[in-house]
Amino acid sequence: MIIKAFAKINLTLDITGILPGGYHALRSVMAPVSLCDEITLEKSDKTEFFCNVESISTPDNLCVRAANAFLQKANITGGVVIKLQKNIPFPAGLGGGSSDAAAVLRGMNELYGNPLTNGDLFALASSLGSDIPFCLLGKPALCEGRGEILTPLKDVPIFTVVIAIGDGRLPTPEVFKKYDSMNLPVRNDTDNFISALGNGIKEDIVASMGNAFTSVAEVLAPETKTLRDEMLSCGALASHLSGSGPSVYGIFKNQDQGIKAAEALKAKGYSAYVCETLN
């Protein structure tokens, strides 16, 4: 069985407080995009994991943890051979690892005859990571709490997206720590986005996008601001950080403009990917 694991972008990301367990409370609109990893699953008497990226081809990879959690919950003796073709850059705020884990849960349930309900799968996803329930849902949604409380959103337009990233990486805990130290005002991009979505005016929807980590990333990784400026100079309607970064995305009018922008970014030494949001 071959299954795709799609990256995600944060169309909005607001931090609204601290939850009882110490996690930050989030309100974010996320959308899957067509950039994806590919995972091959095969039944086996034991679980094995192979990846084209040696640094993450380890027994504690989130794919393996997801597989083991599934087998235990489904009370299945045996395992699975997991082969991961990694195409999504990481760590980058694109949810690649979370999407891989969600794909393993979804794929193994199908592979083994659907022994678990959707409720079971979402409970496993939530126990494994904050973004995994969204990746399991696989459609645009308002994500709250740690990110695991989902409200699917209809009528989110399909956008042509260019995702770009430099060589640097931003560990998520470091970004949250810096955010806390900067005492930034709470943003309200998410409510503005949902309001614009209700009005159905695409220009207003694009204008309402935003990310609470933008100024944090500009301090920790100034290249993110350079990338956003590059996106805008290439004709992007808007450009924002995804997740905690350091990947940056631009929204373009059409695929032709997106392709030209990606080529220009690649010529300047960035990794760039043309894709589109999925509904």
Image: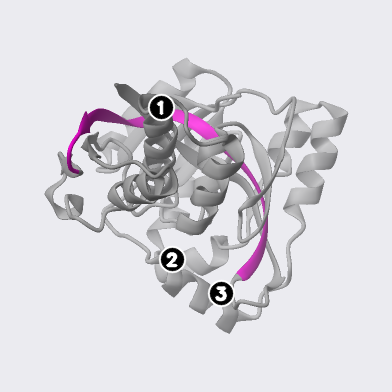
Q: Amino acid at mark 2?
A: Thr
**Could you say which disc has been placed on residue 172 in the image?**
2
Is 212 above or below relative to 198?
Answer: below
**Could you say which disc has been placed on residue 274 in the image?**
1
Q: Quadrant of the N terminus?
A: top left
Residue at x-position 52% and y-position 69%: 216
Residue at x-position 51% and y-position 54%: 243
* Cα separation between marks 2 and 3: 11 Å
Q: Quadrant of the C terminus?
A: top right
Q: Amino acid at mark 3?
A: Tyr
Please tell me whether mark 1 sits on a helix, a strand or a loop.
Answer: strand
Is residue 130 rendered to the left or right of residue 148? left
Residue at x-position 47% and y-position 21%: 257
Quarter of the rendering containing residue 35 = top left
| Magenta span | 24-46
Figure coloring: one colour
User: Can residue 55 be seen from the camera position used here?
Assistant: yes
Nearer to me, 272 or 57? 57
Comes first in the chain, label 3 or label 1: 3
Is-magenta flag for residue 32?
yes
Is residue 195 rendered to the left or right of residue 76? right
Residue at x-position 29% and y-position 59%: 168
**Could you say which disc has been placed on residue 179 in the image?**
3
Circle 2 or circle 1, nearest the eye:
2
How would you rate the neighbour count of disc 2 (Cα within 10 Å): few for under 14, some for 14-19, many for 20 or more? some
Is-magenta flag for residue 153?
no
Q: Amino acid at mark 1?
A: Val
Circle 2 or circle 3, nearest the eye:
2
Where residue 123 appears, x then y in whole percent? 56, 50
How would you rate the neighbour count of disc 1 (Cα within 10 Å): few for under 14, some for 14-19, many for 20 or more? many
Comes first in the chain, label 2 or label 1: 2
Please tell me whether mark 3 sits on a helix, a strand or a loop.
Answer: helix
